[in-house]
Image (cartoon, rainbow, N blue to C red):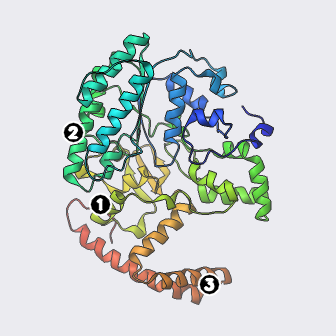
Amino acid sequence: MNSTKETRLKKLPIGIQDFVDIRENEYHYIDKTEVIHSLVTCGKVFFLSRPRRFGKSLLCSTLGALWEGKRVLFSGLAIDSLDWHWNEHPVVRIDLNAGNYTNDTSELKELLYLSMNRTALHYGVELHAVSLGQRFFELLFALAGKTGKKVAVIIDEYDKPLLNSINNEALHEEFKGILKGFYGVLKSADPQLAFLFITGVTKFSQVSVFSDLNQLQDISLDPRFSDLCGFTQAEVERDFAELITRFSGEHSLKESEYLYQLKRFYNGYRFSQKEITVYNPFGLLNHFTNGQFESYWFSTGTPTFLIKLIEEQHIDILALEKMEVKSSEFADYRKDLMLAVPVLYQAGYLTIKEYDPVLKLFTLDYPNEEVRTSFAESLADKYAYAPEQTRTSLLVKFYRSLKAGNVDGFMETLVPFFAARAVLRNRSEKCARKSGCYCRSG
């Protein structure tokens, strides 16, 4: 592990998702290699669901460097002293995060061809197949044949084309067909694979990567890997000690008080039955640039497909706290049966608060104050039925009344919001009479 003195010299890797860049250019890296070691030594084919900007891409990059045998980059990290062979394997990295995928299928096809061609050029193999699936199959066999080593395949944000096209049925079906053919190759190429790791936000049951790969381990709710992405409280207090001291002083708070505010605002994400929570890395690192408690993660944008799901399923947006969901509802999604509340969890707007092992029932709630307050403000923009200036004035009055203990003033500011709630409640009651509705009413 890095010493405290060394840690103080590290730059914060905001927006940097490349492990090699972080290590070679001495950015700060919170050591996740012990749990990564547990992952790579317990199986072969994995799927992990996590919200956006939660470190999935950095994890994929780290796994790539590990399978490439770049031990020097792991010097001083936990895995360097653990039992690992450090053999060099060919690695195929496919990252679908860069595309928009909103107009047609050309962007996806170009990205897949480019990824395969770059990999082939890097390892000095020639590809002749024309179709995407056959070319992928040819690449895997060529790499294994030339190097004499099995291939590690790492696919990041596999589902982004599907999510971005979910409101365009024709385009969605086209993407599904392309990805079925492409990912389906992985089953036939299994003898050539040393490791397969796939990340995304959701798990679409129609995509054959899940139906064909019977040995696939979905570790999204696995307690062993609940802190694989995100920072634990212990990691934050250990690795950011100097910044904690600095910003607690700037806020005129005791360190314990500052840590409480930090945890309340950015911690709270829980990804398994295990009672361990983590910070969102993007929000926390941005906070540590200036010490301001801002909604950094939330402000990066809410996916349009999620907003549409909330509207179509008439979700009572004023009653999202303490939502109960069966564990089976996290397993597979079909476009025609995608339930908004489980997807709100997958996307990071809700998180696990409690788990009933008998009923296999998860209780979901907002993870922290960043999401709670930002979500309330964004919903107020949509549902409060008042001009922005009026809403701002109401929120200021609300805060000042609370601070002054003015009960009458506090209640007066609630009137517009109760009016909005009545409208939404009426919608929910009507919706409850429709079959298949997934909302709270009454």
Which amino acid does the dot numbered 2 rest on?
A: Gly
- Give how far apart the Cα atoms at labels 1 and 3 are: 36 Å
Report the quarter where the N terminus lies: top right
- Give how far apart the Cα atoms at labels 2 and 3 are: 57 Å
Callout 1 secondary element = loop
Q: Residue at label 1?
A: 438
Vertical arrangement, residue 250 with respect to residue 121, above or below: below
Q: Which mark is residue 150?
A: none
- Give how far apart the Cα atoms at labels 1 and 2 are: 29 Å
Left or right of residue 133, residue 347 in this image? right
User: Which circle's residue, 2 or 3, is located before the other in the chain?
Assistant: 2
Callout 3 secondary element = helix
Which amino acid does the dot numbered 1 rest on?
A: Tyr
| Residue 45 in view | no
Residue at 56% across, 26% down: 37
Q: Residue at label 2?
A: 177
Q: Which mark is residue 401?
A: 3
Residue at 27% across, 37% down: 179
Left or right of residue 397, residue 260 in this image? right
